[in-house]
Image: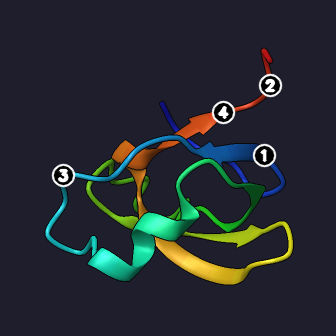
Amino acid sequence: MSFRRGDRVEVYRKSQDEHWQAHMDRFVGLHGIVTDPDTVKNDPEALIEVTLDGAGTHRFPQDCLRSLKDS
């Protein structure tokens, strides 16, 4: 799946990516908006920037995110 700027997403699980850190566990279950999807590369391994509702802006591996379009 490719994410686009403005997409609503959920951090629905811990990532298996090496960039995931223990303090990020508190973000699981939160929703936010993609602010920088790295559309130039559109690399599924790249981190993307998400502004979480009430929790600031962070970069996440894509395997922990899912789109809320169909929810």
* Residue 61 vs residue 4, the one in the foreground: 61
The first of marks 1 and 4 along the sequence is 1
Asked whether disc 2 touches disc 4, contact meaning CB atoms under 8 Å apart, the reply is: yes
Residue corresponding to mark 2 = 69
Secondary structure of residue under mark 3: loop
Residue matched to label 3? 16
Q: Residue at x 43, y 53 (%)?
A: 42
At mark 4, the secondary structure is strand
At 52% from the left and 68% from the top, the residue drawn is 26
Q: Residues within 10 Å of mark 1 (few under 14, many from 20)?
A: some
Q: CA distance from mark 2 to mark 4?
A: 6 Å
Q: Secondary structure at mark 1?
A: loop
* Crowd band around label 3 with a 10 angstrom C-alpha radius: few (<14), some (14–19), many (20+): few
Q: Kindly check if marks 1 and 4 are in contact, taking CB atoms under 8 A apart as contact.
A: yes
Q: Which residue is mark 4?
A: 67
- Front-most of 41 and 57? 57
Position in image of residue 70 (x %, y %): 78, 15
As shown in the figure, which amino acid type bears the numbered disc 4? Ser
Badge 2 density bin: few <14, some 14–19, many ≥20, Cα 10 Å? few
Residue 7 is labelled as 1
In the image, taking residue 43 as reference, residue 68 lies left or right, namely: right
Q: Amino acid at mark 1?
A: Asp
Q: Residue 23: image x %, image y %?
A: 39, 81
**Residue 55 rendering spot, x and y as whole percentages:** 75, 79
| Mark 2 residue element | loop
